[in-house]
């Protein structure tokens, strides 16, 4: 987690000239966004049985996903995103780390009230699973995610905006065990986020 925060800080410092931009999608502007979350699942679906006895085994899920985009010229931005997630339910645990670049184009001018955009993103991810059983080895699943997205940058105040986004993901994954097969999936996501608009 500390390494992720260091990388984000370095990226922000590297693009410190962003304040010279004339509007939210102008050359030199930046979009700093991300999400962090915690979830705890419990109930009848989250119980385990040991020695014939039923025990509560809540599932905990923590995730963190920062993103940074920089406008290299008016309306055209490049950037990247990081992703970390940790899931656990006694006795097993799983952690996932992902990273990747993205490029996009936001439509609009300095007088525009909102900026529709489209982008293409690529990410590499690796998940490590630990069964928690004595003597068992960890297993790893690696994969890629290619995403096409359309969205809207809607400034609600001068430097804060809402970003609804619809994305289509094409994923490919494979485990590291001997008989593992490659898996391909298609995912459609609809999300809404809050972003810092630096210009």
Image (cartoon, helix red, strand yellow):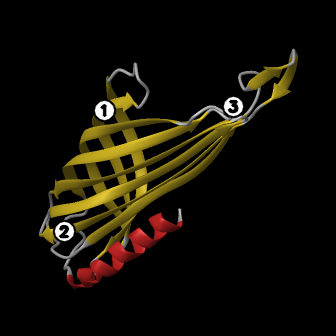
160 is higher (above) or lower (below) than 173: below
Classify mark 2: residues with Cα within 10 Å, few (<14), some (14-19) or many (20+): many
Instruction: Pinpoint residue 141: horizontal percent, then vertical percent.
Output: 42, 35
Q: Tell me if I can see residue 25 in this picture.
A: no
The residue that disc 2 covers is: 71
Instruction: Pinpoint residue 102: horizontal percent, then vertical percent.
Output: 23, 54
Report the residue that reaches farthest toward the front. 135
Instruction: Pinpoint residue 177: horizontal percent, then vertical percent.
Output: 44, 27
Mark 1 vs mark 2: give the one in front: 1
The residue that disc 1 covers is: 171
Mark 3 vs mark 2: give the one in front: 3
The quadrant where residue 45 appears: top right
Give the spatial CA distance, label 3 vs label 2.
Answer: 49 Å
The residue that disc 3 covers is: 133
Q: Nearer the viewer, residue 192 or 39?
A: 39
Q: Nearer the viewer, residue 1 or 51?
A: 51
Give the spatial CA distance, label 1 vs label 3.
Answer: 30 Å
């Amino acid at each position: 987690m500390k390494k992720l925060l260091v990388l984000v800080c370095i990226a922000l410092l590297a693009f410190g000239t962003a304040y010279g931009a004339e509007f939210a999608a102008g050359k030199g502007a930046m979009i700093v966004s991300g999400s962090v979350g915690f979830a705890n699942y419990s109930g009848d679906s989250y119980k385990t049985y040991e020695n014939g006895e039923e025990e509560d085994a809540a599932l905990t899920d923590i995730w963190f996903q920062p993103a940074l985009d920089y406008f290299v010229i008016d309306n055209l931005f490049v950037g990247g995103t990081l992703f970390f997630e940790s899931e656990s339910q006694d006795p097993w645990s799983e952690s996932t780390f992902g990273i990747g670049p993205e490029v996009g184009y936001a439509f609009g001018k300095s007088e525009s009230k909102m900026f529709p955009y489209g982008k293409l993103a690529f990410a590499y991810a690796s998940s490590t699973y630990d069964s928690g059983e004595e003597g068992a080895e960890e297993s790893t699943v690696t994969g890629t995610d290619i995403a096409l997205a359309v969205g809207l940058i809607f400034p609600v105040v001068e430097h804060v905006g809402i970003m609804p986004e619809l994305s289509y993901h094409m994923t490919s994954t494979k485990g590291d065990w001997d008989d593992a097969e490659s898996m391909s999936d298609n995912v459609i996501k609809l999300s809404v986020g809050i972003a810092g608009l630096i210009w």
